Amino acid sequence: MTRIKSVVLGTAILPAVLALPKTTPTHAHYRGRGYDANSTSDRAQAVVDVFRTAWGGYYKYAFPHDELHPVSNSFSDSRNAWGASAVDALSTALVMGQKDIVNQILDYIPTIDYTKTATEVSLFETTIRYLGGMLSGYDFLTGPLSDLADNKNNVDALLKQSETLANALSYAFETPTGIPWNNLFFTSRSNDGSANGLATVGTLVLEWTRLSDLSGNTSYGALTQKAESYLLNPSPPSSEPWTGLVGTDINVTTGQFLDSTGGWVGGDDSFYEYLIKMFIYDPSRFATYRDRWILAADSTISHLTSHPSSRPDLTFVAMYNGRNPSLISQHLACFDGGNFILGGQVLGVQKYINYGLQLVDGCHETYIATATGIGPEVFGWDSKRVPADQAEFFNKSGFYIQNPTYDLRPEVLESFYYAYRATGDPKYQDWAWEGFLAINATTRVGSGYSNIDNVNVAGGGGYGDFQESFWFAEVLKYAYLIQAAEAEWQVSKDGKNAWVFNTEAHPFKVAS
Ligand SMILES: *[C@@H]1O[C@H](CO)[C@@H](O)[C@H](O)[C@H]1NC(C)=O
Ligand SMILES: *[C@@H]1O[C@H](CO)[C@@H](O)[C@H](O)[C@H]1NC(C)=O
Ligand SMILES: *[C@@H]1O[C@H](CO)[C@@H](O)[C@H](O)[C@H]1NC(C)=O
Ligand SMILES: *[C@@H]1O[C@H](CO)[C@@H](O)[C@H](O)[C@H]1NC(C)=O
Ligand SMILES: *[C@@H]1O[C@H](CO)[C@@H](O)[C@H](O)[C@H]1NC(C)=O
């Protein structure tokens, strides 16, 4: 499906001879006459408008650098100066049908030199943002959105550049175990020698397997599947305190886990996410991954489920150190509700869907409890550790704030999206819309959108002056898709998905 850009009608009286195209979109009235906040197509168009505002600021003041500093109208290159925001924005511009932006990005990508960078490269971040963004673009532009590309050579370049990038990264896997180093220095073809982690090792396999399937070079998938094998069969036994739930740091030389701490939090999160997504990508090749997801999900329900003493109606998931749970969670972890729902749908197991919906409720509470209507980066609910100045807040809300920042993160909206796709309940569209309005009202500044200092102070307590590339890839994509019309890339209600989203929200076509 392609969408026509909405016609700007304003209040001008159109000459009678100026015929409107037959395909005048239903939301054409949005700009001129305000919009109906209960109309999902008007909401979707409002998200597109925000996307265009953010892209315009980035394009004017930062392109082709990695990200915009919207307050100072400047830029930085935190992701190796390959244009992270542009590559990350591509799949969102595509699903939104923003042809002009799609082609600005497509004209740029063939000019990137992925073999050179002066700064440290994260194998994980590079994989999920750059490789994920280009492969998703390739899947869309060789598939259902092919008419959005002006130049077919630019589409071919997406795959070529993906191979060039993966080839430049692949020396990371030259270790005694095959587990890659994460932090790389291209100039000296070296690494920083540090332990790798569960999420950073376990969130490569979808992108690199897709690249193998598209390019015909089987090495990419093989490298990451070998690395993943150490995560699926963890050693020593103490690193798996509950079946399926594992530690965090891994020695690249020995393949041994170095601890038994973890959870669904940052550093661990997308390892669990990808177990079920690999099964969606190809059930015949990745059934073992599904089995490990089921073990992790069941152990989570049995051992990590927690209800705050002041709000026993809420459900949060604890972290752990060995078999000791700690009652802390994060905005990052709020993808978990969506992932349980997705797993439940795909496996046809209602208990995972029900559990996921409870987690979605809990994360929604972290949004509606604060002064801005946005949830905090880190929160806790241990009744013995409530900060004195948050006692009243804890009594009312069921959690206290440990880190009050908001970094333009998507996870809560992402879980609303899965909840809506599974249930069809418009409540989740309303929640996503309210979250989007709060984020738009609080983080909009200067030439774009910024991270903020304090979600529990009206206005957000100050700006960090940094517009993350995942603002384009994730926040605006989920905020849009939950309101948008049916399309083949939307998560399906019946558990039979034609597309699967990587952890950066870049949709890939599943292996057929
Ligand atoms: C939107 O829907 C709600 C609930 O159905 C209703 O109370 C509200 O008045 C509606 N708002 C508009 C602007 O139509
Ligand atoms: C296949 O990928 C591997 C891993 O990056 C690379 O070393 C090799 O050169 C590639 N083969 C071809 C024919 O491009
Ligand atoms: C990993 O194990 C090797 C071999 O035992 C050891 O030399 C190295 O210091 C360990 N590295 C880390 C980060 O623990
Ligand atoms: C919190 O709730 C407890 C138990 O209901 C009560 O004893 C305490 O006074 C409350 N504290 C505040 C600050 O509201
Ligand atoms: C988003 O914020 C901008 C700037 O404050 C505002 O003009 C716009 O109306 C907001 N969008 C929505 C849908 O509220």
Image: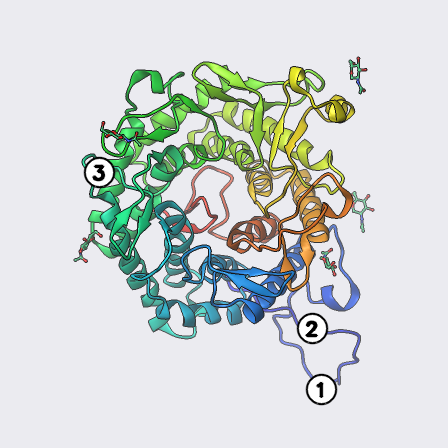
Tally the numbered discs.
3
Q: Going by the image, does 74 lie left or right of 91?
A: right
Residue at image point 66% right, 44% down: 453
Residue 133 visible in this rendered orientation of the protein: yes
Amino acid bearing label 3: Gly
**Circle 2 residue:** 8
Q: Going by the image, does 440 lie left or right of 491?
A: right
Mark toward the start of the polypeptide (2 vs 3): 2
Structural crowding at the residue carrying mark 3, measured as other residues with C-alpha within 10 Å and reported as few (<14), some (14–19) or many (≥20): many
- Give how far across and how far down residue 322 sits, in percent: 43, 16
Real-space Cα separation, disc 1 to disc 2, in angstroms: 17 Å
Residue at image point 42% right, 70% down: 108
Question: What element does badge 3 sit on?
Answer: loop
Mark toward the start of the polypeptide (3 vs 1): 1
- Give how far across and how far down residue 34 sits, in percent: 78, 62
Q: Nearer the viewer, residue 391 or 305?
A: 391
Structural crowding at the residue carrying mark 1, measured as other residues with C-alpha within 10 Å and reported as few (<14), some (14–19) or many (≥20): few
Q: Nearer the viewer, residue 199 or 145?
A: 199
Structural crowding at the residue carrying mark 2, measured as other residues with C-alpha within 10 Å and reported as few (<14), some (14–19) or many (≥20): few
Which of labels 2 and 3 is toward the front? 3
* Contact flag, marks 2 and 3 (Cβ < 8 Å): no
Numbered badge on residue 17:
1
Which of labels 3 and 1 is toward the front? 3
